[in-house]
Image (spheres, helix red, strand yellow):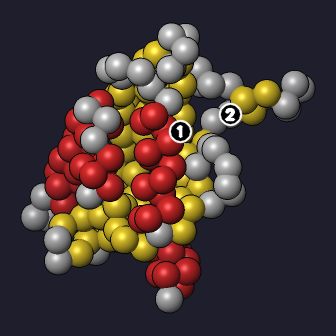
Amino acid sequence: MFKQACWAAAALAIGVGCAGGATAAPGGDEAAIRALEARFTAAVTAKDVDAIMKVYAPDVFVFDVVPPRQYVGGAAYRKDWEGLMSGFKGPLKFEVSDLAVDVAGPVAWSHSIQHIAGVDPTGQPSDMTVRVTDVYRKTANGWRIVQEHVSVPVDPATGKADLQSKP
């Protein structure tokens, strides 16, 4: 069922894109999604995994930059976030930029650039920029991310990831 919903969301996104693009939805849905992203940014900056997970649906499906290939469900993705947060000693800096949001009824999608930096447990600087595409579903509890794809560009000549991802 979840796979079908994701395919339907993707088809809807393509259809709306072909029809000339979506506009901000009445009722402030785009603003609500931007507020969700602001809460997410604050939660990551605070290294608060409980607050981070509140932006995701329980049945979230994620392709992340780190193995395994995919995370199915909130419990699996929570472990990924716990691992990421344990990789930073002390405070971290997290920011979302270039956020573009489109809404079509109870489904929305966005893409953004996300940058995280701090110090790893050995005291070495850690700095990474990723590209993120999210699909959201409007629920009785507000908007939630139901699918996320996190990636970095790869240099085909070297096979190495570009963790700084400059335009």
Q: Which residue is mark 2?
A: 153
Residue at the far front in the pictured view: 122
Q: Earlier in the sequence, mark 1 or mark 2?
A: 1
Tell me which residue sits at (62%, 60%) in the image: 70
Secondary element at tag 2: loop
Report the disc number at residue 111.
Answer: none
Q: Which residue is mark 1?
A: 131
Q: Quadrant of the C terminus?
A: top right
Residue at the far right in the pictured view: 157
Tell me which residue sits at (49%, 81%) in the image: 2
Residue type beneath disc 1? Arg
Judging depth in this view, the residue of 2 and 91 nearest the camera is 91
Residue at the far bottom in the pictured view: 1
Image coordinates of residue 11 in percent, x first then y, are 53, 75
Image coordinates of residue 110 in percent, x first then y, are 40, 51
Secondary element at tag 1: strand
Residue 146 visible within the image: no
Residue at the far left in the pictured view: 27
Residue 57 visible within the image: yes
Image coordinates of residue 71 in percent, x first then y, are 56, 62
Marks 1 and 2 in Cβ contact (< 8 Å): yes
Whole-number angstrom distance, CA of label 1 to CA of label 2: 8 Å
- Side of 68 where 129 appears, left or right: left
For residue 53, what is the image quadrant? bottom left
Tell me which residue sits at (50%, 62%) in the image: 76
Image coordinates of residue 164 in percent, x first then y, are 59, 20
Residue type beneath disc 2? Pro
